[in-house]
Image (cartoon, rainbow, N blue to C red):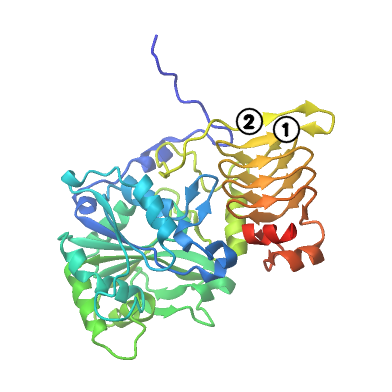
Amino acid sequence: MPDTAPPARVPGRQRETKSQKAAARRYVSRLTRNTLAVIMAGGRGERLKHLTDFRCKPATPFGGKFRIVDFVLSNCVNSGIRRISVLTQYKAHSLIQHIQRGWSYLRGEFGEFVEIIPAQQQLGDMWYRGTADALYQNLQIIKLHHPKHILVLAGDHIYKMDYGPMLAAHVEKKADITVGVVEVPRDQASSFGVMTVDENMRITRFAEKPRDPEGIPGREDYSLGSMGIYVFKASLLYRLLEEDAQKAGTAHDFGRNIIPGALQNLKVFAYPFKDVNTRVQQYWRDVGTVDAFYDANMELVHVNPELNIYDEHWPIWTYQRQYPPAKFVLDDAGRVGMAVNSMVSGGCIVSGAHVNQSLMFSNVRIDERSYIERSVLFPDVRVGPNCVIKRAIIDTGGVVPAGTQIGVNPEDDARRFYMSEKGVALVTRDMLSRLTK
């Protein structure tokens, strides 16, 4: 008998079709092997409020066991891009620690690496003045790798994407610059770089975060938004960065300066992030606000979530501490340990409590007669007995005192915690510690 069982079908995942299996084949080629990915992971993430008090946005936990940055790193590795530079700046300690622990398995002797490049004031007493300046200040380091193409990526979005076809399209069209794009609701497009394209997807106009975004012809309720993904021929990027650095009065930013300035003289194309077979737009989320972050996590507990993190063909790699399996204990009247329509990570113990439509990161403990509903509990959270928690995010290490109610009385919550525009309570360890004083 074989000593391995066939892979079990994961609940909530539909059987794959032939076209889906074909799409799952990775586009690994000389193009991807000669590409250097540069991940911009230095942003403050201020709109995530207290979630980024002590960490940068790419290091924020997401999806029960991951960090946000794991998605773009996994996309690179799964695409065959194994030369990756990560540019950091603000509150980078937990990000650097996570990458060192979880992403150090690539083999340097084979030319594979994930290197962390901290902000070093390479060119004087200034930190990075914009996304383009971040690359310019590290140009000598980038040139050491002799890439043919450079793929510039944002480190703070949630999506699964094979970058191989985008690189292939860039070369096939003989483009100077290729920009990854998604269709976004027009009333939300002011947070994006918005562009206009011709019938060949060549970009004719580009506006960074415009007050009145331009709609897509024939679909005026939507705009074409930048994903923060750019492909350049390396030699062209070097020239553009050097020219931008000499200019005064610019933001030294890709969206505000480099891309708009290139439209007149260079061939700049948009690459729609769509399924290669169905042409349906793929899953992509900018989890830049508390509500967007909460909603994206809550989507994962649906029966068939749009983001399939159980995809064996496109795994999301990460580092996580080693824990025993999750455990649900007690079966007495009023004290039944259970979780329904929820995701529960390793090391969690639900002891005589009820968890409903929630997402629990590793090593969370819920004590008896507590009720958790539509909430996100970060690693190492402790919930005492007789608590009620609804529509909340509890940050790492938070200890919820016995009998605490969150999401029940909005006035009480507003005094004690941060409340998002949609009424989600963001609760930190410091906020909880003040409840016991």
Which residue is drawn at the image coordinates 42% and 75% (left, top)? 195
In the image, 242: left or right of 355?
Answer: left
On screen, residue 242 above or below 99: below
Q: Position of residue 432 (x, y in %)?
A: 69, 57
In the image, 394: left or right of 46?
Answer: right
Q: Residues within 10 Å of mark 2 (few under 14, many from 20)?
A: some
Q: Position of residue 109 (x, y in %)?
A: 16, 44
Q: Residue furthest right?
A: 333
Residue 337 badge: 1
Q: Which residue is mark 2?
A: 327
Q: Is residue 275 visible?
A: no
Q: Residue furthest top?
A: 1
- Of 275 and 433, which appears nearest the observer? 433
Q: Residue furthest bottom?
A: 249
On screen, residue 311 above or below 67: above
Q: Amino acid at mark 2?
A: Lys
Give me the C-alpha separation between circle 2 and circle 1: 9 Å
Q: Is residue 359 visible?
A: yes
